[in-house]
Amino acid sequence: MILLRRLLGDVLRRQRQRQGRTLREVSSSARVSLGYLSEVERGQKEASSELLSAICDALDVRMSELMREVSDELSLAELAASAAANEPVPAPVRPMLNSVSVTSVAKVPTERVTIKAPTEAVDVVAA
């Protein structure tokens, strides 16, 4: 069984280690107990959205980046589980975005940026 809390903890630990930071530094900056942060990183505790936000702020990582990395890990784990069980891998179904409007945080508050998303998603197939 794939546990989301374990994948999330693994990604948080990697982010922290990439920065060369200790649990103590991040827990202090996020105002989370060192023991609790350790349990989250080991996948033993479920982190609330408020806690994730505080940890992401402490690591200077966007929550969307964190969740994207967790999603990628989950996809790979599902592929591996399907391959191990000799099950056919179903084609993923995702909504396609045509465009997304983003309000800039620049000096001019009326400035808008349009991000064009691809019309087709690219899937990675494990060999």
Image: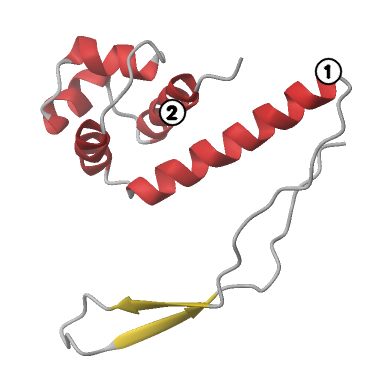
* Distance in Å between CA atoms under marks 1 and 2: 24 Å
- In the image, residue 8 sits, relative to residue 126, either above or below, namely above
Please tell me which of labels 1 and 2 falls first in the chain: 2
Decide: few, some or many residues near mark 2? Use Cα within 10 Å; few <14, some 14-19, many ≥20. Answer: many
- In the image, residue 80 sits, relative to residue 106, either above or below, namely above
Instruction: Kindly indicate the quadrant of the structure image that contains residue 89.
Output: top right
Instruction: Kindly indicate the quadrant of the structure image that contains residue 38.
Output: top left
Task: Give the residue drawn at x 79%, y 41%.
Answer: 90
Task: Give the residue drawn at x 89%, y 22%.
Answer: 86
Viewer-side residue, 75 vs 92? 92
**Left or right side of 75 for 106:** left
Task: Give the residue drawn at x 26%, y 29%.
Answer: 48
* SS for callout 1: loop
**Left or right side of 14 for 53:** left
Question: Three-letter amino acid code at disc 1?
Answer: Ala
Task: Give the residue drawn at x 59%, y 32%.
Answer: 74
Q: Position of residue 64 (x, y in %)?
A: 39, 50
Decide: few, some or many residues near mark 1? Use Cα within 10 Å; few <14, some 14-19, many ≥20. Answer: few
Quickly name the residue at label 1: 85
Disc number placed over residue 8 in the picture, else none: 2
